[in-house]
Amino acid sequence: MIQQAIVLNDWEMMLRLSTESPLEILAYLEKHPQTQGIYFLDVDLNTKMNGIQLGAEIRNRNPHGKIIFITAHNELLPLTFQYKVEAMDYIAKDNREETKLRVTEALRQANQHHLLVAESVDERIRFEIGNRIRWVELSEVMFIETVPGNSHKLILHLRNGSVSFLGNLKEIEQLSPAFYRVHKSFIANKQNVAEIDQKNRELIFNNGERCLVARKQLKQLI
């Protein structure tokens, strides 16, 4: 139903994962933390974790994801409020044609919402800082650097201030197309580069901070 609706309406969506295992969904989100997905979940998963508990875990990882429950267990609807899932819809699956219409409409609404916010809302980047997960607006990120002598400790340079955390540049580089590895020790947010100092091989950012750029990356960046 989902694939057919996507094709017939020519929406820019792709079916990424179809599984009976809630752990497989959580593992996917662990590998792809920037996912902004639409999740169609049954409530009874025949596992220790039911669909509503899974929805709560998804909500923790993907605050702006769209969650739709498709189930025969209407009596469990109140649990979505208990677990603060904030579901987009709750579709009964006792009538196939009705289910098909509701699935298509849910996808249509999710697509319209995406198109409305895509241009007005800044991209948010997920950073794990200590035991906390912090979402940072991309426009606030200048660059990320490794701490000298400790390649696993990074410094996130923001428009106003900085914060250190554990991580590695290879993983950070994958968080946004705007991130570019300009040096073995630096990743720059290309959107916030104000000037390129070719003589000193430095990038100057919108807040006045600077970082080094390697000769090869300098040519590619220009």
Image (cartoon, rainbow, N blue to C red):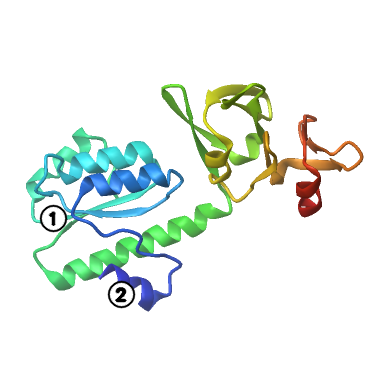
* Residue name at image x 60 percent, y 51 percent: 177
Mark closer to the chain start, 2 or 1: 2
Is 174 on the left-hand or right-hand side of 100? right
Question: Residue 58: which quarter of the image?
Answer: top left
Pinpoint residue 136: horizontal percent, then vertical percent: 55, 34
Disc 2 marks a residue whose amino acid type is Gln
Describe residue 171's horizontal placement relative to residue 5 as left or right: right
Q: Quadrant of residue 131?
A: top left
Residue 90 point in image, percent of width and height: 20, 53
Residue drawn where x is 8% and y is 64% of the image: 94
Q: Residues within 10 Å of mark 2 (few under 14, many from 20)?
A: few
- 11 shown above or below 25: below
Q: How far apart are labels 2 and 1 at the CA level?
A: 20 Å
At horizontal 77% and vertical 40% (from top left) the residue drawn is 213
Q: Is residue 217 above or below residue 146?
A: below
Q: Name the one closer to the observer, 102 or 129.
A: 129
Location of residue 124 in the rendering, given as x and y in whole percent from the top left corner: 53, 41
Residue position marked by numbered label 2 in the rendering: 4
Image quarter (top left, top right, bottom left or bottom right) of the N terminus: bottom left
Residue at horizontal 28 percent and vertical 38 percent from the top = 57
The residue to which callout 1 is attached is 71
Q: Secondary structure at mark 2?
A: helix
Q: Secondary structure at mark 1?
A: strand
Q: Amino acid at mark 1?
A: Thr
User: Which residue of the protein is positioned furthest toward the bottom in this rendering?
Assistant: 8
Whether residue 128 is visible to the viewer of this picture, yes or no, is yes
Classify residue 39 as left or right of residue 130.
left
Q: How many numbered tags mark residues here?
A: 2
Is residue 45 rendered to the left or right of residue 191?
A: left
Residue 55 percent across, percent down from the top left: 25, 43
The relative height of residue 147 versus residue 176 in the rendered view (above or below) is: above
Asked whether residue 89 is in view, the answer is no
